[in-house]
Image (spheres, helix red, strand yellow):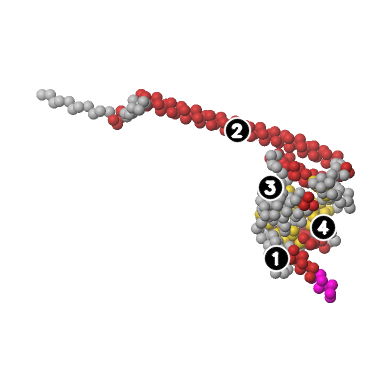
Amino acid sequence: MLRSILYAFAALIVAVTLSACGGLAPPNTKAIKPLSSALVSKISSIGSTPGAPMMIRIFKQSSELEVWKQTSGGYKLLKTYEICAYSGDLGPKIREGDRQSPEGFYTITPGLLNPNSQYYLAFNTGFPNKFDRVHGRTGSDLMVHGDCSSRGCYAMTDEGIAEIYALARETFKGGNASFQLQIFPFRMTAENLARHAQSPNMSFWKNIKAGYDRFEIARTPPTWDVCNKQYVFDVPSGSSLDAAAACPANVASLSPDLQAKQAADQAAMDKAMAELAAKDAKAAADAQKAAEADAAAKARGEAIGSFIGGIFGGGDGQKVIDPAVEAPTPAPRPNRV
């Protein structure tokens, strides 16, 4: 009996700590609503189970949240949800109050779930993580929640967050201690990177792209840590790096597949940037040509106007006489007998 009381009190403390963007509401049954039979069937159809490990990916630019489930053949995409709203622009969150939604790699544990959110249901992203902290980034209670309204969070429909929350709950019930949340500005393709090549966030984006690439190749969430103030991936299990110190030599190695992908992506990015530069140069040249043509047409019009004005007495301050309007009326001819 005492243990039950202590557990209930601990749950209340967890709920209170998650009361900002996620908010608090009276206790409800939404958090224990079972998965729909249709969703359970879909999980089965990809070769997974409700209790199997999961992973979430978020893409800001396209407003998409993906839920992936582990199968015997690697992780497979279960469902994509539309994000109603997120705060700020592309790029990571820097400081408390900047109304910016975070980007990076985060670890979601059961304690980050908020069943009593005033925004229907919610889970905390875990911001700031180890990377954020070593860069001095600040912020609190950055959530994925319902209610379609965001102040630095990722807002879903109530129906969407209900499913996502239930999937997380079932994953934890299956014995998994956590799942990975990956948040990107956009799909990390060479074309998208080329479009944003001048962004001050490019170095950061290339850093998190290293984790994106690993998942694209292996279809399993990469392990990650932080050293030299950068994300590093495929870190040996059980190791813990100093976020501010130089990285050990053994965390910098790349598999042949990863080396080939990164080289191909860089070549594609260089090509896309060259094509965009050529397109911009052509657009600028066309605009200049159009402006010159307009100026020439205007000059011709003024010249013609001056010529006509000269014919009819215009120019040099003289009044231009319209012969059809202002020609003198001839005197009446005298009557002759």
Q: Nearer the viewer, mark 1 or mark 2?
A: 1
Which element carries disc 2, helix, strand or loop? helix
Amino acid type, callout 2: Ala
Question: Which quadrant would residue 118 be assigned to in this image?
Answer: bottom right
Is 255 placed above or below 132 here? above
Q: Earlier in the sequence, mark 3 or mark 1?
A: 1
Q: CA distance from mark 2 to mark 4?
A: 52 Å
Q: Residue at 88%, 42% (x, y): give it.
A: 249
Please rate how many residues cluster around mark 2, counting C-alpha atoms within 10 Å: few if below 14, some from 14 to 19, many from 20.
few
How far from the left and from the top, in percent, is residue 157?
67, 59
Cα–Cα span, label 1 and label 2: 54 Å
For marks 2 and 4 on the same chain, the one whose residue lies earlier in the sequence: 4
Q: Residue placed at 25% from the left, 28% from the top?
A: 328
How far apart marks 1 and 4 lie (CA) works out to 23 Å
Residue 12 falls in image quadrant: bottom right
Alpha carbon distance from label 2 to label 3: 27 Å
Q: Report x, y in % for residue 180.
A: 80, 54
In this picture, residue 234 sits left or right of residue 87: right
Q: Are marks 2 and 3 in contact (CB under 8 Å)?
A: no
Residue 109 seen from this side: yes
Residue 90: image tag = 3
- Specify the farthest residue to the bottom: 1
Q: Which residues are magenta?
A: 1-8
